[in-house]
Image (cartoon, helix red, strand yellow):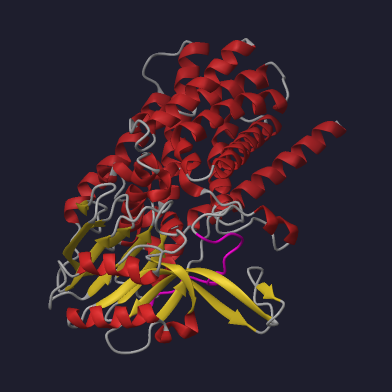
Amino acid sequence: MNFTRAQRYLLSLCSGILLSISFPYTGSITPLVFIGFVPLLFLSEDLQTQSKGGWHLFLQTYTAFLIFNLGTTWWVANSSFIGALLAFVFNTLFMSLTFVLFHFVKKGLKANWAVWTLIPLWISFEYFHLNWDLSWPWLTLGNFFSIRTSWIQWYEYTGVFGGSTWILIVNIFLFLWIRSRWMKKEKLWDKWLLGATLSLIIPVLISLFHLPLLTFYKGADFYQVAVVQPNIDPYNEKFALGTSNEQQLQRFFTLANTIVDSTTDLVVGPETAISQGFIESRLQGLPFYALLQSEMKKWGSAELLIGASTVELFDTKHSRASVYIPGQRIYYESYNSSLHIPQKGTPRFIHKSKLVPGVEMIPFSNLFPFLETLAIENGGTSGTLGIEKSPKVFRAKEKLAPIVCYESIYGDFVSKQVKQGARFLTVITNDGWWGDSPGYKQHFSFSSLRAIENRRWVVRSANTGKSGIFDEFGRVKKETKYWKDAAFTHSIPLLNRMTFYSKHGDYIGIISTIFFLLILGTTIVNLVLSKKK
């Protein structure tokens, strides 16, 4: 093979388009993801054959991954054009550098099996991308199947990295098959096509046969939840000057009171439903708390889980999120919080841990404090918010996992909440920032992955977008419409079984990282030895 530069860019274009139209709600033609990397593999092979450097590959893969990023997450620009631009540029950069590193390793190893190193290298990138300040795991390959839950019931063993591995295995087999047919003129049916066929079909068959064999409800207790979607415009209403917590809560309770009865155990409201910030220790003395109490008395025994913008005060600097108030000689920290209010007892807060880079957290501002001045204002606050240092659960009538917005993309984070005894999952979010776009639909579908990984029902309350219920197989049992006031009740089973993934989390990412380091070390040694000869 000896492609021209135009042909190589055409291959890049093909990969970008294939990956984009196979992603949920930007095409949703999921099977195409199994060939999405094939053009890039041919691109790498061709450049290696022509002894061209990694710079050429970087430029051409950057084209592919930029199309992928723009095609699937263009809607981020609806909330912040600058934030979206930075996300597109840097996420594309990281993907391209990962592929260039793969090309370097393959070239350095000079072995027929080197093409398979793409798997640990790419999974290592995805794992690393989950665990640093610039984290943006929206496009993790395993997320492609959030709308094909009948294919991936085995995520209870692997999590989304199992899906990423599956995609890469099939792509590599198909690349090897096409190459053998094209270059070596081998027969139509060979070992590579057999490998591609089996690796594609077997996981689906396992999932389809696995599904009817699973039973979880035997002896399970049931819990009655009420979900409220108040549908408050986040741009012009929710955080507007002059808006009070009492006004917005009254709208919330007007909806809730139409569905809550004596059988209701928990009422769930969305992220920042209490949008005007307040000091946590002073909650019970604030006027809107009296409204909360008076309305909750109508519910009987039902408890409340709701999102709130909160503040804590400190005598000394508590974290990088601490802001000094000179006149009072104290520090304050702002939080995006979950608030649990029982009928009797003390309200409790859990702060959001996984923050949106650039909006809720300024990347690397702990190392470079001046970066805080570049914060993007979104939702009434700017700068880095405070966080919980580790995942937590509320010990209410039943242990429940409060998952705030962006946290629902982090499988390992949610699995740690399940390990603490959460018998169901609650996602509270505000997806109205993105308008009527694929964004809120994609975010909604990702909850199905958390349900399968942990075999827990998911209760989802959105300010707008989609609220809903997922069963432990990731199937949607209830969903609301976009930009509509909504409230509903649903009975959910409280499940106890711990899945392999719940126990071990992102172990595939850890194993892949170890393999990646060994492969990289071997490559460097080979290159050093070859230069000495």
Q: Looking at the image, which is closer to me, 62 or 84?
A: 84
Across and down, in percent, residue 303 comes to: 26, 78
For residue 466, side relative to residue 54 (left or right): left
For residue 27, side relative to residue 137 (left or right): left
Q: Looking at the image, which is closer to me, 9 or 324?
A: 324
Q: Quadrant of the C terminus?
A: top right
Q: How many marks?
A: 0
For residue 405, side relative to residue 105 (left or right): left
- The majority secondary structure of the magenta stretch comes to loop
Tell me the residue at 37%/65% (across/down): 273
- Image vertical order of residue 146 relative to residue 247, above or below: above
Which residues make up the magenta segment? 380-396
Q: Residue furthest right?
A: 532
Tell me the residue at 58%/21% (across/down): 43
Across and down, in percent, residue 525 comes to: 76, 42
Quarter of the view holding residue 215: bottom left
Across and down, in percent, residue 203 comes to: 32, 42
Quarter of the view holding residue 157: bottom left
Across and down, in percent, residue 87 comes to: 57, 42
Question: Is-magenta flag for residue 296?
Answer: no
- Image vertical order of residue 396 relative to residue 16, above or below: below
Q: Looking at the image, which is closer to me, 88 or 518?
A: 88
Question: Is-magenta flag for residue 391?
Answer: yes
- Image vertical order of residue 341 relative to residue 513, above or below: below
Q: Is residue 530 visible?
A: yes
Q: Looking at the image, which is closer to me, 91 or 501?
A: 91
Q: Residue furthest front?
A: 242
Q: Quadrant of the N terminus?
A: top right
For residue 192, side relative to residue 135 (left or right): left
